[in-house]
Amino acid sequence: MFSLEQRQELLHRPLMGLYPQFIQRFFLPLYYGLRGRHYARYRRLLEHSQWWSREELLAFQWSELSPLLDHVFAHVPYYRQKYQAAGIQRGDIRDLADFARLPVLTREEIRAHREELRAVNVAQLLPHATGGSSGAPTRFYITRDSYDWRTAATHRAYSWSGVGLGQLTLYLWGAPIGTPPRWKLAKVHAFNALQRQEIVSTFSQSPALWQRIYEWQRRHRPALIVGYVSSLEAYAEYLAAHALTPPPPRAVISAAEPLPAATRRRIEASLAAPVFNTYGSREFMSIAAECSAHSGLHLHAENLVVESALPAAAGASDILVTDLHNYGMPFLRYAIGDLGVLDDAPCECGRGLPRIGAIEGRALEVLRTPDGRVVPGEIFPHLMKEFPEIREFQARQLALDHIVISAVLDQPLSAAHRELMESELHKVFGAGLRIDLERVDTIPPLASGKRRVTIGMGG
């Protein structure tokens, strides 16, 4: 759809105004600085380090990984026992090649040994959970410092689209679960308003929703549109079907789901803007993102060590991720559940950051409502992470007004959580939806070993 020359021309239009400069150079550094946080320092480093050579990046990774390993062997009980059982001592790990000998960390280990994976000398931790895109939510902890690294990496990834913080951005996104307190909602709304972010939930899709988004886009002319792949594709299809041509944004960022080439072409054709794909997870936030060359996704090598279980010549293999800065609950060589191929060859953009090719993650089926709306399967991972009783799940739509949720439970779902689950699904599917929660001992995987998290009618 867009040649490299056209993409470069779009990216270098002089659109940066005074307000985006205020947000990036004053407001966010002040906001985090007053709270004793280091976001601004990490953001400055990442802007500089993306141009380092591969050798400089590898040296930086080891300079961050070495003290993390000292910390893990001294203060994280589960790793100490696991590595001792494998016959590995701290002195055996002298470089990144030695690091690759450490046993892989699995989701099952995190679920079974979460508290033993916490560092005994780190007090203040933030609880988090994955959305369970594989059908099994994972609960973990991070530190505020690692959150600052993640935020800085995410903002850098988005900047590769040519649109900076403070430029009007439309998000075709999810919705908060439950009813947050008014003060919290007011804080979120104020923060979004300052950053000029308009967030629209696309968990309940209909022609009326897409028409409303189209009219908002035509009226406000956002510089950037960010969304789930399935939401962007559905919006693009609506525009094409109704011959609507909104004013083009400068770029589109796709997230959360695989981006097939045909889907990219449909989105670019309808929105008349290049798509920049991203790859991330709840465990690490942004892992990789496309630059203007659109030849693989650059990894945030200053914050993460990303490995493939097999050499690139063997094709796609399990992706292993190490967070260099989460000292509260370190993730070392974590099997994230996706497959991919790493690429260390230089990129024509000039960045030294390594890349990852196509990621083979989970594609979630869409569901439907009695009144004809489409609901992306992403709603279930988004919702199920809120319920610690659920170890694994699978949602099946048997009829337009009937959904069965099979769940492996560590303990019975509380009445409050059952009520929250039903109220959130009724918001999207309608009050007449019948929801059956079926407690099971196991959810069989497909022959490939993966799980189907959502199954639409006829699936």
Image (tube, rainbow, N blue to C red):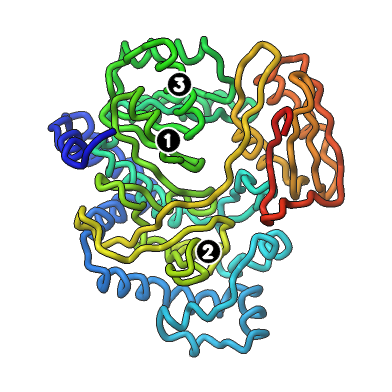
Left or right: residue 162 versus residue 65 is: left
Label 2, on which residue? Answer: 317
* Mark before the other along the chain sequence, 2 or 3: 3
Tag of residue 262: 1
Residue type indicated by callout 2: Ser
> Callout 3: helix, strand or loop?
helix
- Contact flag, marks 2 and 3 (Cβ < 8 Å): no
Residue type indicated by callout 3: Glu
Q: Where is residue 67 in the image (x, y as percent from the top left)?
A: 43, 76
Quadrant the N terminus occupies: top left
- Residue 194 in sight: no
Q: Position of residue 55 (x, y in %)?
A: 26, 73
- Contact flag, marks 1 and 3 (Cβ < 8 Å): no
- The total of numbered circles placed on residues is 3
Left or right: residue 237 versus residue 440 is: left
The residue carrying pointer 1 sits among few (fewer than 14), some (14 to 19) or many (20 or more) residues within 10 Å by Cα, namely: few
> Callout 1: helix, strand or loop?
helix
Query: Which of pointers 1 and 3 indicates the residue nearer the eye?
Result: 1
Tag of residue 179: none
Instruction: State the residue in front, 250 or 2.
Output: 2
Between the C-alphas of marks 1 and 3, the distance is: 12 Å
